[in-house]
Image: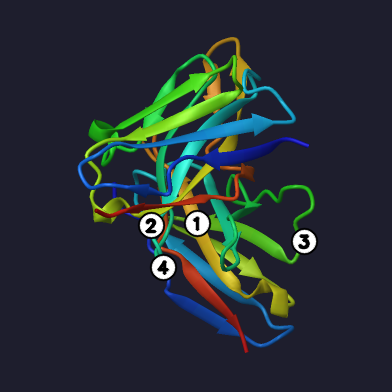
Amino acid sequence: QSALTQPASVSGSPGQSITISCTGTSSDVVGYNYVSWYQQHPGKAPKLMIYDVSNRPSGVSNRFSGSKSGNTASLTISGLQAEDEADYYCSSYTTSSTLVFGGGTKVTVL
Amino acid sequence: QLQLQESGPGLVKPSETLSLTCTVSGGSISSSSYYWGWIRQPPGKGLEWIGSIYYSGSTYYNPSLKSRVTISVDTSKNQFSLKLSSVTAADTAVFYCARHPARITMVRGVIVNWYFDLWGRGTLVTVSS
């Protein structure tokens, strides 16, 4: 199974909105609404931010939102804050009953 | 508050078997509401799902690792374990255990939710002679 494709880096100024893309195939992103997003700060474990494409777990800021169109899922962070600077990973269920992650995107707050 | 804690040797020699255990505290691993998984992250690189297990022993594995991986569960100890055989330097990584929700349906049996809502802190395993 091939990793999902994410941009290596995305940056924005405080208060701006940024969007991270996650591109897959008919075997994963296209075929299922089981895309999730994780935030990882340096030296820390990942934290679930979005599940099943657009659902936010309890306690996650509503500045984080998810969507999907065709073979691309997206994570949007609105009102960018310094604390949002981290690595972000998408993942998707696949037709092989497995899970695949994206390569990760480093978000920089300018 | 349920917590997960990885444990095991931090150094493994090439060609040997890496063995890790995840201890679940503050809740039961035998809950029908969860699968339990292993994920690894090589230094400076991305996440890779290794596999997942239900308390009944039902498993899912990453095809790229399946020939070398065994995941097992010990409900009496509230633990699940990972064994990765024939390791090389490329297997050096931080290994995380994590939980993903599941639900039981009358028609389809156990349905796995393919996201991890609770993670352990991770443990670094280095493969080196």
Q: Amino acid at mark 4?
A: Gly
The location of residue A73, given as percent across then percent down, is 50, 58
Distance between the alpha carbons at the discs numbered 1 and 3: 17 Å
Q: Does the image show residue A80?
A: no
Q: Residues within 10 Å of mark 4 (few under 14, many from 20)?
A: few
Quarter of the picture holding the C terminus of chain A: bottom right
Cβ atoms under marks 1 and 3 closer than 8 Å: no
Residue B34: % across, % down: 61, 27
Question: Mark 1 or mark 2, which is nearer the start of the sequence?
Answer: 2
- Residue, x 30% and y 51% (percent of image)? B91
The mark found on residue A90 in the picture is 1
Q: CA distance from mark 2 to mark 1?
A: 8 Å
Q: Chain of mark 2?
A: A
Compare residues B102 and A71 and report the one nearer the observer.
B102
- B87, above or below A96, in the image: below
Q: Please tell me which residue is depicted at 42% across the width and 58% down the height of the picture.
A: A102
**How far apart are the alpha carbons under marks 2 and 4?**
18 Å
- Return the residue at label 3: A61
Q: Amino acid at mark 3?
A: Ser
The amino acid on which the numbered mark 2 sits, given as a three-letter code, is: Leu
Q: Are marks 3 and 4 in contact (CB under 8 Å)?
A: no
